[in-house]
Image (spheres, rainbow, N blue to C red):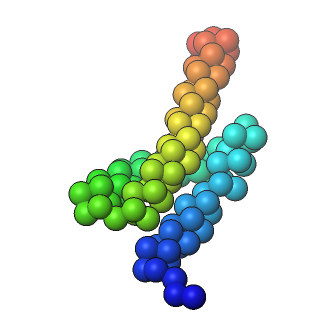
Amino acid sequence: MLISVDMFGYIGATLTTFAFLPQVILAWRSDNLSGISLPMYLIFVAGTCFWLTFGILAHIGPTIAANTVTIVLSSSVLFLKIRDMRRSKKISEHHDVASGPR
């Protein structure tokens, strides 16, 4: 049985894309996202958007499929990181106001 070239792409895409799943699950369950790098996820999501665009323009199914799912997964971690940073900032500002002038 011969495996098509696209099948290799889909298998590789599935493995590398779903490698993000543990990070996404951990991020959703955790209140501490301090170990998540905001610049890394911003750059990664932007790069993945370019890969998706490339796949669409070149009509490469595995690239389209993998990057679509990867954008959803990595964007969810990015959203959680930004939300966590905003919450931390609000808590810090509230603490500063509650402490009074120094």
Write down the quadrant of residue 87 in the picture: top right
Query: In the displayed image of the protein, which residue is found farthest to the right?
Result: 29
Quadrant in the rendering for residue 100: top right
Q: How many marks?
A: 0
Quarter of the image for the C terminus: give it: top right
**Nearer to me, 14 or 95:** 14
Residue at the outermost left position: 57
47 or 82, nearer to the observer: 47
| Left/right of residue 54 with respect to residue 75 in the rendered view | left
Q: Which one is in front, 36 or 45?
A: 45
Q: Residue at x 65, y 48 (%)?
A: 24
Is residue 5 placed above or below 87 in the rendered structure? Answer: below
Above or below for 57 versus 90: below
Query: Where's the N terminus, which quadrant?
Result: bottom right
- Outermost residue toward the bottom in this view: 1
Across and down, in percent, residue 76 comes to: 56, 41
Q: Is residue 58 left or right of residue 73?
A: left
Vertical position of residue 101 compared to residue 92: above or below: above
Residue visible at 74% across and 41% down in the picture: 30
Which residue shows up at 43% across the image and 74% down it? 6
In the image, is residue 62 above or below residue 53?
below
Residue 16, position as x, y percentages in the image: 56, 67
Residue 32: tell me if it is visible.
no
In which image quadrant can residue 17 be found?
Answer: bottom right
In percent of width and height, residue 25 lies at 71, 47
Evaluate whether residue 9 shows in this view.
Answer: yes
